[in-house]
């Protein structure tokens, strides 16, 4: 009898110990969950207090910057956690651009703006416009078509950069795309606009719709070439957005790296014509050399009197990380590449 009582008491003590351990573990887990929740709240409140970008899914809504520094900006930035977001001006120790140039360096892998100078201010893009022309061409189902050049394609101001097409020439859309991006041919741009849009006016509407779709709300285009027009403008940040969008197409990445191209077409009599086109990007022709351990993978140039000398490039650093770098408004090509190298040099620091 006594043995039975002792056994019962022993079982009771075991149950009490088990319950005690369970209560202790439950309390510890509750304390841990409370501490973790508090830590998350502190981090979120800290990010808000320091005006750091909060992660959000892609939205077509426009987020306007309202800080004192940005209160005079006329452009808004579409918010995406897949994009680099930053202030109008972001300093980088020891880095300054010449004169009135504007620019930005964007780390694609880190989604970070490494440097920015007036990146939301209105500028004229010149032929960097052709990034958007190329995007619409690549999005279309027209790349396998063969095009007969018409007079509308050659309605260009004197001195325009062209590949030399004439009325009645026939050429593939693939070749037009290469003439557009490699040699910045305005005749190629006009022909692409007609084929993709039906009319240049419709194509311009498509350009502005696409600008809004990628968040380039500080831009408005009036033509597919970038020839100067007071109502044809963009920002450094929007150029980043356009190049970032173009990079999504394998076709663009393969063309952007070409330094010299054998442009082929048939003249009105059916004769095959070959024209050697040099890239307008001096990095690709070897006339300019990037900083050590930086590989320039291509991009787009632009030059007009109003825009100055402009360049946007995709580059890779020694660790395989990708960057987009933009410089606009340089007084000369020498100054343009000097400033671009200043930005590219930051990629390995």
Image: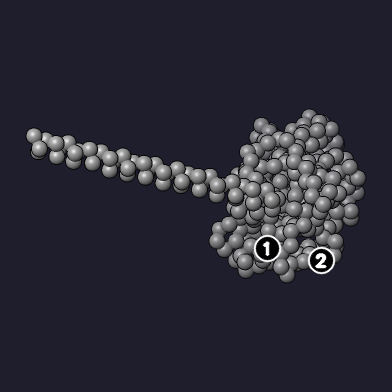
Q: Mark 1 sits on what residue? A: 344
Q: Nearer the viewer, residue 180 or 91?
A: 91
Q: Position of residue 61 (x, y in %)?
A: 73, 35
Q: Quadrant of the C terminus?
A: bottom right
Q: Mark 2 sits on what residue? A: 98
Count of numbered badges drawn on the protein = 2
- Relative to residue 96, is residue 24 drawn left or right? left
Q: Quadrant of the N terminus?
A: top left
With respect to residue 52, does 139 lie above or below?
above
Q: Position of residue 155 (x, y in %)?
A: 88, 40
Q: Quadrant of residue 5?
A: top left
Q: Residue at x 85, y 54 (%)?
A: 307
Q: Position of residue 129 (x, y in %)?
A: 78, 46
Q: How would you rate the neighbour count of disc 2 (Cα within 10 Å): few for under 14, some for 14-19, many for 20 or more?
A: some
Real-space Cα distance between discs 2 and 1? 15 Å
Instruction: Give the mark nearer the N terminus: 2 vs 1.
Output: 2
The local secondary structure at tag 2 comes to loop
As drawn, which residue projects farthest toward the front?
A: 2
With respect to residue 316, does 229 lie above or below?
above
Q: Nearer the viewer, residue 282 or 62?
A: 62
Q: Quadrant of residue 19?
A: top left
Q: Nearer the viewer, residue 274 or 103?
A: 103
Q: Residue at x 64, y 48 (%)?
A: 45
The local secondary structure at tag 1 comes to helix
Tell me, what colour scheme is on the image?
one colour
Report whether residue 112 is seen: yes
Q: Quadrant of residue 146?
A: top right
With respect to residue 280, does 151 lie above or below?
above
Q: Position of residue 278 (x, y in %)?
A: 72, 56
Q: Residue at x 77, y 57 (%)?
A: 89
Q: Residue at x 81, y 66 (%)?
A: 98
Report whether residue 185 is seen: no
């Amino acid at each position: 009898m006594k043995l039975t009582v002792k056994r019962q008491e022993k079982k009771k003590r075991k149950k009490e110990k088990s319950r005690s351990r369970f209560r202790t573990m439950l309390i510890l887990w509750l304390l841990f969950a409370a501490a973790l929740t508090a830590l998350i709240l502190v981090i979120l409140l800290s990010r808000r207090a320091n005006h750091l970008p909060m992660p959000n899914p892609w939205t077509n809504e426009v987020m306007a910057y309202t800080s004192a520094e940005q209160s005079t900006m006329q452009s808004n930035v579409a918010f995406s956690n897949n994009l680099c977001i930053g202030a109008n001006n972001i300093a980088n120790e020891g880095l300054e651009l010449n004169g009135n140039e504007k620019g930005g360096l964007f780390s694609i892998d880190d989604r970070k703006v490494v440097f920015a100078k007036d990146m939301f201010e209105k500028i004229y893009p010149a032929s960097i416009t052709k990034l958007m022309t190329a995007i619409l061409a690549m999005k279309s189902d027209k790349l396998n078509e063969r095009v007969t050049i018409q007079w509308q394609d050659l309605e260009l101001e004197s001195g325009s950069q062209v590949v030399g097409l004439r009325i009645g020439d026939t050429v593939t859309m693939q070749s037009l795309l290469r003439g557009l991006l490699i040699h910045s041919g305005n005749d190629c741009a006009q022909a692409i606009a007609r084929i993709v849009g039906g009319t240049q006016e419709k194509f311009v509407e498509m350009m502005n719709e696409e600008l809004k779709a990628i968040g380039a709300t500080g831009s408005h285009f009036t033509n597919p070439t970038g020839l100067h027009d007071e109502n044809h403008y963009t920002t450094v940040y929007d150029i980043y957005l356009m190049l970032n969008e173009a990079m999504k197409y394998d076709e663009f990445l393969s063309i952007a790296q070409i330094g010299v191209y054998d442009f082929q077409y048939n003249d009105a009599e059916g004769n095959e014509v070959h024209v050697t086109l040099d890239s307008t990007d001096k990095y690709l022709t070897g006339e300019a050399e990037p900083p050590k351990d930086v590989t320039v993978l291509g991009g787009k140039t632009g030059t007009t009197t109003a825009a100055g000398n402009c360049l946007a490039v995709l580059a890779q650093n020694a660790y395989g990380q990708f960057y987009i770098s933009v410089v606009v408004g340089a007084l000369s090509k020498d100054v343009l590449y000097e400033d671009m190298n200043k930005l590219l040099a930051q990629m390995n620091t």
